[in-house]
Amino acid sequence: MDITINNITVTLQKKDRTIGSEAPAIRVKMLNGETKVIGMMADSVQVMISLPFPNSLSDQLETIISKHNKSSNIYIISSKKLQKNTDTSFSSTEFKDYAL
């Protein structure tokens, strides 16, 4: 499977995942410098949102994130820093590593 990041095509080398199978865990460095392990068992729901462009965070998605961020761990992964301000402890630009 191939993905495109910043106009560069990257071939994914991991096995394909299917719905209902175990989620892979990954270490991701957040914009605040903290490294988090996401995808493993957690006390609350983990939501991973991948956004392709710096302007991809819509007002509607922001509203949903604001509504559920107290009861969920919502991670926003993008290839570049988003144009809108986000919680830097739950935002990352390590899209390539995350996608692999």
Image (tube, helix red, strand yellow):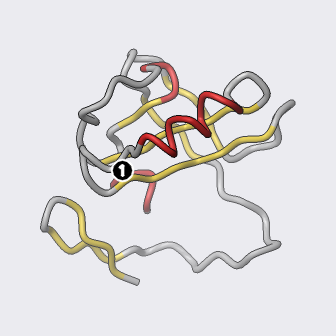
Q: Quadrant of the C terminus?
A: bottom left
Q: Point out residue 30 in the picture as x, y percentages from the top left corner.
A: 43, 26
At 61% from the left edge and 40% from the top edge, which residue is drawn? Answer: 64
Q: Nearer the viewer, residue 45 or 18?
A: 45
For the point 64% across and 75% down, the residue is: 17
The quadrant holding residue 33 is top left
Q: Nearer the viewer, residue 78 or 12?
A: 78
Image quadrant assignment for residue 71: top right
Q: Is residue 98 above or below residue 28?
A: below
Depth check, front residue: 69 or 17: 69
Residue furthest right in the image: 43
Q: Report the residue at 13% width, 67% height from top.
A: 7
Q: In the image, is residue 38 above or below residue 56?
A: above
| Quarter of the figure with residue 86 | top left
Residue 4: % across, % down? 25, 70
**Quadrant (top left, top right, bottom left, bottom right) of the N terminus:** bottom left
| Above or below 57: residue 35 | above
Q: Position of residue 35 (x, y in %)?
A: 50, 25
Which residue appears at 47% of the width and 18% of the height?
34
**What residue would you read off at disc 1?**
95
* Percent position of residue 73, x then y: 68, 32
77 relative to 26 in the view: left or right: left
Q: Horizontal placement of 62 versus 64: left or right? A: left
* On screen, residue 41 above or below 16: above
The residue sitting at the bottom extreme is 1
Q: Secondary structure at mark 1?
A: helix
Task: Point out the residue furthest to the left here.
Answer: 7
| Disc 1 residue type (three-letter) | Phe
